[in-house]
Image (spheres, coloured by chain):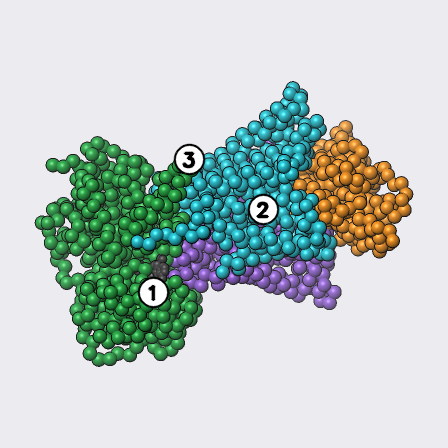
Chain colours: A orange, B purple, C cyan, D green
Amino acid sequence: AQDKVVIGVSIPAATHGWTGGINYWAKVTQERLKETYPNLEIILVTAGSAAEQANTLEDLYAIHNIDALVILPFESDPLTDPVEMLKMQGVFITVVDRGLTKEGVADIYVAGDNHALGRVSGEYMVEALGGKGDIVVLRGIPTVIDNYRFDSFMEVVEGTDINVLDWQYANWNRDDGFQVMQDFLARFPKIDAVWAQDDDVALGVIEAVKQAGREEELFIVGGAGMKEMIARVMEADRLIPVDVLYPPAMIATGMEVTALRFVSNASVLGEYILDATLVTPENAHLYYFPDSPF
Amino acid sequence: MNHPTTDRQARLKQLGTRFSWQDIGPFAAVVALMILGTTINPTFLSMANLTNVFTRSAFTGIIAIGATFIIGTGSIDLSVGSMAAFNSGMMIIFMNYLVKTWGATWATILAAMGLAMVLGIVGGFVNGFVITKGRIESFIVTLGTMGIFRSLVTYLADGGTLSLNLSIRVLYRPVYYGTLWGIPIPLIVFGLVAVVGAILLNKTRFGRYVLAIGSNYDVAHYSAINVNRIRVLTYVLQGLCVAIATIIYVPRLGSASSTTGLGWELEAIAAVIIGGTAMKGGSARIWGTVAGAIIFSIIGNILNLSNVISQYLNGAVQGLIIIGAVLLQRTGKE
Amino acid sequence: MNHPTTDRQARLKQLGTRFSWQDIGPFAAVVALMILGTTINPTFLSMANLTNVFTRSAFTGIIAIGATFIIGTGSIDLSVGSMAAFNSGMMIIFMNYLVKTWGATWATILAAMGLAMVLGIVGGFVNGFVITKGRIESFIVTLGTMGIFRSLVTYLADGGTLSLNLSIRVLYRPVYYGTLWGIPIPLIVFGLVAVVGAILLNKTRFGRYVLAIGSNYDVAHYSAINVNRIRVLTYVLQGLCVAIATIIYVPRLGSASSTTGLGWELEAIAAVIIGGTAMKGGSARIWGTVAGAIIFSIIGNILNLSNVISQYLNGAVQGLIIIGAVLLQRTGKE
Amino acid sequence: MPELALQTKTICKTYGTVPVLFDVDFDLKKGEIHALIGENGAGKSTLVKILAGYHEQTSGELLRKGQPVRYHNTGAAEADGIVMIHQEFNLANDLDVEENIFLGKELLKRGLLDKAAMRQRSTDILDKLGTKIKPRTKVKDLSVSDKQMVEIAKALAFNSEVLIMDEPTAVLTTSEIDVLFRIIRALKDHGVSIIYISHKLDEVKELADRVTVLRDGYRIATEQVSDLSEDDMARLMVGRELSTLFPPKPDRSQAKPAVLDVQNVSCPKYVENASFTLYEGEILGFAGLIGAGRTELMECVVGLRRRSSGDICYRNQPLWGHSYADAIKNNVVYLSEDRKGKGLFTALPLAPNVTVLSLQDHVTKFGFLDSKKEEATLDRTVQEFEVRLPSSKAMLGMLSGGNQQKIALGKMMQVEPDIVILDEPTRGIDVGTKQQVYRFVRELVKQGKSCILISSELSEIIGLSDRVIVMRSGRIVGELLGDEINEEEIMLYATGIKGGVGDEPSDHRQASQA
Ligand SMILES: Nc1ncnc2c1ncn2[C@@H]1O[C@H](COP(=O)(O)OP(=O)(O)OP(=O)(O)O)[C@@H](O)[C@H]1O
Ligand SMILES: Nc1ncnc2c1ncn2[C@@H]1O[C@H](COP(=O)(O)OP(=O)(O)OP(=O)(O)O)[C@@H](O)[C@H]1O
Ligand SMILES: [Mg+2]
Ligand SMILES: [Mg+2]
């Protein structure tokens, strides 16, 4: 019999909606792959911070002796070195979502495109507002990813007559989204649109807008593809006309191509870039997964 | 022999709720912050904004009232935020389940509220029991249960979000968004909890024993106070407060996830201490705690109402204001 | 008259490092956890794994040694995690700046190390100064500075990540990954800090005064101890420990961001208390703290050993093990 | 005229708005023992605290060897050779004896603590004081009397020129006091000046050269001790004539029922197989040297300390195995000797302290605390025990030592006890009030209540007890009745000359029959 192939999967702990989705898809894929390929062993570990994730990498190698690593890095920069350490030990590396800061470390890169998420959102905003209006922005947690999204969004918006009244961090958290939006609503008598960037935040924003009774005045663009939000888009909710996809299922892609590399010996190297698809009432049914927790 | 002078102060003391600079201090800080807020942005004083700010303070405020008793005995509870998340999750699951048989009725909601209470009491009891019977520092035990509750809600939500059935949500919504005599319901609940808390603390044997234990554990023991029982009771009370906070939290967003209630424990403890309760126990002030919770809420609001300073520095401004607010109290005391 | 029995116990005590069940307890917990780890997965005992586990404990461990003194006086410091992030950020910025003139040399690195030390001392001093001069609860002040430091690093990083220049990184890397006589450098540093900490605590006036203050503030004051100065010194010492931890942290990940060091404060405090130092002050144990830090590191490792339990429940398992480890110590004491 | 070591001129002290000392002139000659006496709250502790740098005077001048000085803290006073033994213990509970003795003045060797030297010195001092305290014991594990010895040792470890002792003997027994007096006299011979505060006037008479009397913050008199009798002193203090200290004992002809029957109680390390019976209407004294285990035995009896064996019957009912609360329910109440550590909440106001044992009686009909009732109870206690309050808002810790003790007694009386167990009840109380306490206790037992009295003051045991039990090293070694109750007999048992350790329990039965 063939030797067991061990794939380590290191992802952030489920601390908010999107990472929750990552966890869900990783677990589902783990089970499916194990069933399909009996000689495959998949070790799934989670971490609450970049430093902790570096720990899990050490553990995956020292304890589980992994042959391949699928990693969704907490943050690109701090994890580049620890991943490279594994690479030097001969571990096959698949990076998902956030690229490492050093070329050539990743064998496979399944890229979520944070720039695109910001850009697509911005482009929709410009189109829907007809190039002018007052908007507010709720950002995530201060991180590089958030910067990519925000900067790309602003690039698109900057040339137009769209005026960003203010932005605040909402930490990809519903309660923060609610509170920040409450205060924006109190502060600005006229808001034409809200870019919430994340569906968790958008949920909070919706409630704040409802409370203020200003549903007719504005619309909200979230992001990620949470099932509740996709459902609203499907139902052609005025408040949530679209969503921008940043599917947590990308971890499944990463795990699958990595598994493929070992079971088929096919040469699966290179980059897989996942689009930041704009979900509209027309295509929403394609992205609706009622069983997913996210 | 000379008799105690029954001056006005002493008379006021007899009202059960005592007024002194220590109590006024936090409210002075509230007023100062409100002036600051108005200066930065006159919108601050709008009815809508003030209502938001005060209403928001209800969650941490209610939890902080429970924490006042715990800190009054010289202990700590780090698990409250996670417990709130877990309770929310359980309420949602329970309502989603009941709605299938009972429909979207008040019965369903009331049953879920009952469940929250039971869970709060049980959770608090477990904390208190392990702390007293195991003779372990409360910091460690509640750090442990903090992790446990948070994990459980993550597990229940499969890492994602637990969402309340839409039909119930419509029914339940007014509990957060509704008003009674023009006052938001969460504020009324907050007020009631504070009044009950103040009575418990100042007018009952339980409250007296709490302060006695915080003042000197050994003396309390030698005064025939069942120290362990009172300590467990403070944790049960804390659990109940968390449950009440949960009950008004769930209708706000109708969902719970692993991020729910993150950091509430620090906020609640800070509210208690800003309010003039000593970390080492022995003195506690419910109305100070109420002011402390409001202070927190106002600081957050002020930061969102202005963008003079880089948003990156919000945390710094918040930190400075917290320290400043407490310094202000201290200085006034001299 | 009868002389004090100079039995072995007493003799050992005179070595400055005292051995008693309270000290052995945490180590017993370490051993129990190691047995647990080995049972779950025999690879646990591999040299490579053990090295990883112990090396990792160095960061929190070093910070926790500083925290032992602070908690020994009955205070708390919540700002250490943020301070570590801020220090890391400043080190990186400084090195990236210096490299332009001095090149990727050890001079650059040493200068940055010096900067970290200075920042640690200043940061600690500020904490201590505001606490003692403002007569504010340490909880509030350090909660404030926690926000301030974290904001500052966010600001410095413009919301993103500060990355160390690659050429320096190569040079600096061995400080975390290298070994001396086969022992990882972080472990050597940890050991040195612990030894110095133990000497400070048990063999110097400073250490004795720390415990005296924690035991009874007034008694210390009336024993002609400059209470405020000692308290400020504990914060300066804590700042220094944070600086040392930063110095070995930066080469590990080569970057700093607003999430660096998040939660280290709770871990450090927990390590101290698991180690047998009382939260209310008056007694402190450096070697217990060392064991506490190792316990934390092992728990994290054990969670990665197997895949039996849902990863959502990691936090619950961690919580249970923490409580269990402390319970084990307590039971052993009887 | 010998040089003045210390002198005060028109010293005034005000706490907040409460004046406590008024224009006090006081002087201390080099090499003299100067006693300071006065009623509780007269201002003795306040005066000496100013001399030792604990407090600063509000006005007035302090002269040291003729030079004006002002001590802003204890360090400054210590540097000037002035050391004080605090009435309320000034010890860090979590540190051990040795660490406390040298706190703030540790010996160093090459910058590090010289533990060996400090160990040696503290052992020497403790030996000199004749105690069995081990230097490595944590202070919190010591009995009150042992803590007092540590306080004394702490002061002696420092080579002072002026030694201030604020009631050093309140909880010490005769033999410890003898040792202490020997040391004090030796210090005096070496030129040390000593201020000695005590409520035990016989001690003052025996020891001091001069005596200063304070009353209500005023200096009333300074006299040569040889010119005054004890009664003169008492009169100067109280401002009126005092009758005999102890109320007459009733004759105990008729047999009374037993109210408390204690059989074979043991508590590891402290008490071994102690058995005794308390009868209705009697005062049962417990005598013994420091560390005899009297406190621990009583704590076992009321359920504050776990006993390893033994049965306790209250009026023929086996009772309260578990908690002090059970004992209280049966109106058995215990006054702890450790006022600060176990007796009273120093950081709380007065009313909560007085009512804590009887809160259920201080509620409105709806079950809420009734602060009016509490205030009334406090007022009653204040009157009954003549407590001197700085103000009604005072925290307990602001009261003078003796007044705190009165509050402690008042607290206990709120449960309307059937059996009172008093451990050092008159600790720090002035003669006038002592007399009242004795009458009070006598009244109590006349009403059919019973009382156990533990006291380090032999005269108190002898003057008040109807029967005396002597303990030594955790065992009951003797029981004395009637004329046997005298100092000599008690000391024979307490020191082990009679009823030696290792004797069978039957031995003390015989003793009681003797
Ligand atoms: N910190 C304080 N604040 C307010 N009043 C105080 C304080 N300390 C003492 N007093 C008051 O000062 C007065 C004198 O107290 P002091 O302790 O000097 O009396 P004393 O003569 O030592 O009495 P005792 O014999 O009971 O020890 C008392 O009325 C007391 O209540
Ligand atoms: N059998 C014993 N072995 C060792 N130490 C003992 C023993 N018995 C008593 N001691 C010491 O004596 C102290 C207990 O004193 P205890 O409180 O019983 O004295 P007491 O009889 O109440 O007298 P007093 O209250 O006047 O000191 C303890 O600190 C303990 O160290
Ligand atoms: Mg006094
Ligand atoms: Mg005793």
Residue D124 in the image, given as x and y percentages of width and height: 31, 47
Three-letter amino acid code at the position of disc 3: Gly
Q: Residue at x 61, y 55 (%)?
A: C32
In-image side of D477 versus D359 (left or right): left
Mark 1 element type: loop
The residue carrying mark 3 is D111
| Disc 2 residue lies near ligand 2 with CB under 8 A | no
Q: Which corner quadrant holds the N terminus of chain D?
A: top left
Residue D425 occupies quadrant: bottom left
Q: Earlier in the sequence, mark 1 or mark 3?
A: 3
**Front-lying residue, B139 or B292:** B139
**Front-lying residue, A267 or A74:** A267
Three-letter amino acid code at the position of disc 2: Ala
Q: Residue at x 23, y 52 (%)?
A: D179
| Disc 1 residue lies near ligand 2 with CB under 8 A | yes
The answer to whether residue C53 is seen in the rendering is yes
Determine whether B318 is above or below D476 in the image: above
Whether callout 2 and callout 3 share a subunit is answered no
Determine whether B325 is above or below B234 in the image: above
